[in-house]
Image (tube, rainbow, N blue to C red):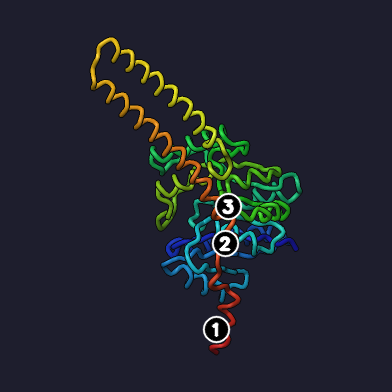
């Protein structure tokens, strides 16, 4: 038997979780009918949800032995959720997908066919449209991919999703990267392996709302840039040279003007101009270096990526003790 682990990070997904469970059951049944040697496990990661997500997962785990879950002690973020799912998965193949049905379960049979024969180590989806998103958000998303691929040696395909069907070999390679500051899109590309991209149109959520705000995505994009490129440090150096050159030229022009047409105000303005220019440059470069140092600071602490409060096993034992 070949076991497929389906890892599903969840954060406040009580509205859409029953819909997802219904759809994934249909897909698993279809795949079992086509491939009798397949078995499944559903591994949900409750990322400190504040709604009834955990209660739903408890009920599902009691009714369906294929359902497992890990509930975090607090919200650690989707990156930690994906890592925990990969770490605790038992399958020969591992799927990572969202519970909001924007990653359609109907793609799983096709993804399995690409990976099962060993021709590909990973099958993933790539959005070719961004219908349902605001123009501003779409613009910055495309801009991020362009910037990232220019300044980093790790290529990230525009529109690539976290929705992935991976071989155990690729999953093990990802788990070797235990960095605290994680950017999985970059990690998936960095480890290499042969990947098949499946293009599809964007799918909107059938229920609930996304927990990703514009500023949340913006901060996440910065995490990717700082995690897979040192170009900002180099850019700060070039910017420093450029601004010093501009300041020097401006200072010479003001000195010449002061000599030709004596004016005490020109000297004062020259001093203010140079002071503001160089102070701004110093603050910018210091902030850039400080951001990299803060990442290093968090890494050397060796804090756990996540902390577990409850699993389906501990919950079952608790229920048995109560009985």
Reading the image, the residue beneath label 3 is 106
Numbered disc 2: secondary structure: loop
31 relative to 305 in the view: left or right: right
User: Quick one: quadrant of the C terminus?
Assistant: bottom right
Q: Position of residue 178 (x, y in %)?
A: 63, 56
Q: CA distance from mark 3 to mark 2?
A: 38 Å
Reading the image, the residue beneath label 2 is 303
Can I make out residue 55 in this image?
A: yes
Q: Which residue appears at 43% of the width and 69% of the height?
A: 52
Which quarter of the picture shows residue 65?
Answer: bottom right
Badge 3, how many Cα within 10 Å: few under 14, some, many 20+?
Answer: some
Badge 1, how many Cα within 10 Å: few under 14, some, many 20+?
Answer: few
Residue nearest the viewer, comparing 228 with 272: 272
Q: Earlier in the sequence, mark 3 or mark 1?
A: 3
Q: Earlier in the sequence, mark 3 or mark 2?
A: 3
> Mark 3 or mark 2: which is in front?
2
Can I make out residue 26 in this image?
A: no
Q: Earlier in the sequence, mark 2 or mark 1?
A: 2
Say the numbered circle drawn on residue 319. 1
Q: Which residue appears at 55% of the width and 46% of the height?
A: 161
Say the numbered circle drawn on residue 259. none
Q: Residue pushed farthest top?
A: 260
């Amino acid at each position: 038997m070949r076991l497929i682990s389906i890892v599903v990070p969840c954060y406040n997904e009580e509205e859409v979780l029953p819909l997802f469970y219904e759809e994934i059951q249909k897909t698993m049944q279809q795949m079992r009918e086509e491939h009798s040697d397949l078995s499944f496990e559903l591994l949900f990661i409750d990322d400190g949800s504040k709604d009834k997500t955990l209660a739903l997962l408890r009920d599902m785990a009691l009714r369906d032995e294929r359902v497992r879950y890990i509930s975090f002690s607090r919200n650690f973020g989707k990156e930690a959720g994906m890592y925990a799912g990969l770490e605790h998965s038992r399958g020969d193949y591992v799927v990572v997908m969202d519970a909001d049905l924007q990653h359609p379960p109907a793609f799983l049979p096709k993804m399995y066919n690409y990976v099962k024969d060993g021709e590909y180590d990973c099958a993933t989806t790539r959005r070719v449209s961004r219908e349902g998103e605001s123009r501003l958000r779409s613009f910055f998303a495309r801009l991020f991919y362009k910037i990232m691929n220019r300044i980093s040696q790790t290529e990230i395909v525009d529109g690539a999703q976290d929705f992935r069907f991976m071989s155990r070999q690729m999953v093990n390679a990802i788990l070797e990267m235990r960095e605290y500051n994680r950017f999985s899109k970059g990690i998936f590309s960095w480890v290499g392996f042969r990947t098949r991209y499946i293009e599809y149109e964007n799918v909107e959520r059938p229920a609930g709302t996304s927990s990703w705000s514009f500023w949340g995505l913006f901060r996440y994009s910065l995490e990717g840039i700082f995690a897979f490129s040192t170009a900002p440090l180099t850019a700060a150096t070039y910017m420093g040279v450029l601004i010093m050159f501009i300041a020097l030229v401006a200072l010479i022009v003001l000195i010449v003007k002061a000599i030709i047409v004596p004016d005490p105000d020109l000297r004062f303005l020259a001093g203010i101009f140079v002071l503001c220019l160089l102070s701004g440059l110093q603050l910018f470069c210091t902030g850039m270096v400080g951001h990299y140092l803060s990442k290093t600071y968090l890494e050397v602490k060796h804090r756990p990526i996540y902390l577990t409060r409850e699993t389906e096993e501990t919950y079952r034992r608790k229920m048995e003790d109560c009985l």
